[in-house]
Amino acid sequence: MIVDLEINYRDERWRRFDFKKYINILFRTDFVLSKIRNREISLSLLACNNKEIKILNNAYLGKNKITNVLAWPAEQINDFCNPKKQVKKINNKKFLGDIAISFDYCLKEAKMYKRSFDKHCCHLLVHAVLHLMGYDHISGNDASKMQKIEYRILHKIKMQIFQKNI
């Protein structure tokens, strides 16, 4: 699978985190490969801070609070912009959507969960990509299903990258 990841670094502290490495590994897991038919995809990522993610959370979800990660699936964008549901493509790659992630919030959570920063951010990327693929956690059943998928993917990634549990 070819993944074109466009990263906008609004917070320079993110430059130490290898988004491309983790995204490429994530998109090579069996689960993701089985769900995404198009083998050439693209997505964009905003690597930001608490101030910016709070603004986005308020503007798009009506929640005036800081969060760790946000995701906007292109399917929803396409439904809103074009009722014929044409798939948005960038450079002939299927565009999955946009992700925003806050450095400050991720660092705080990693410390709180006693987890390495990289492991925690990897978990949040899996979570965000599942949102881009149409998964959600609004209801209890959906949340349980999404969490099981997250942990299955994280287990596969862990075997490739990390020595300790994610």
Image (cartoon, grey):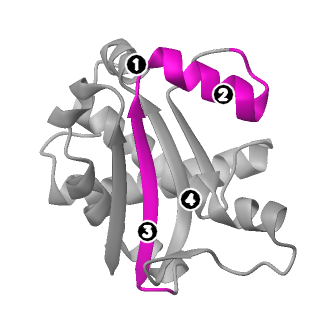
Question: Which residue matches tag 4?
Answer: 97
**Res. 60 image quadrant:** top right
* Sequence-first tag of 2 and 1: 2
Q: Quadrant of residue 164?
A: top left
Q: Nearer the viewer, mark 2 or mark 1?
A: 2
**Residue 82, image x and y in percent?**
81, 71
**Label for residue 57?**
2
Relative to 126, 114 lies left or right: left
Helix or strand or loop: what does disc 2 sit on? helix
Give the magenta part as a residue range.
38-64
Q: Is residue 153 above or below residue 11?
A: below
Write down the residue under mark 3. 42
For the point 27% across and 65% down, which residue is it?
Answer: 24
Distance CA(mark 3)–CA(mark 1): 28 Å
Q: Residue at x 80, y 43 (%)?
A: 139
Q: Which badge, 3 or 1, is on the more N-terminal residue?
A: 3
166 horizontally vs 37: left or right: left
- Inspect the image, locate mark 2, and give the three-letter code of the amino acid beneath it: Asn
Name the residue carrying label 1: 109
Q: Which tag, 4 or 2, sits closer to the chain's start?
A: 2
Q: Quadrant of the C terminus?
A: top left
Q: CA distance from mark 4 to mark 1?
A: 24 Å
Three-letter code for the amino acid on which mark 3 is drawn: Ser
| Secondary element at image label 3 | strand
**Distance from label 2 to label 1 (Cα)?**
18 Å
Q: Can residue 116 be seen by looking at this rendering?
A: no
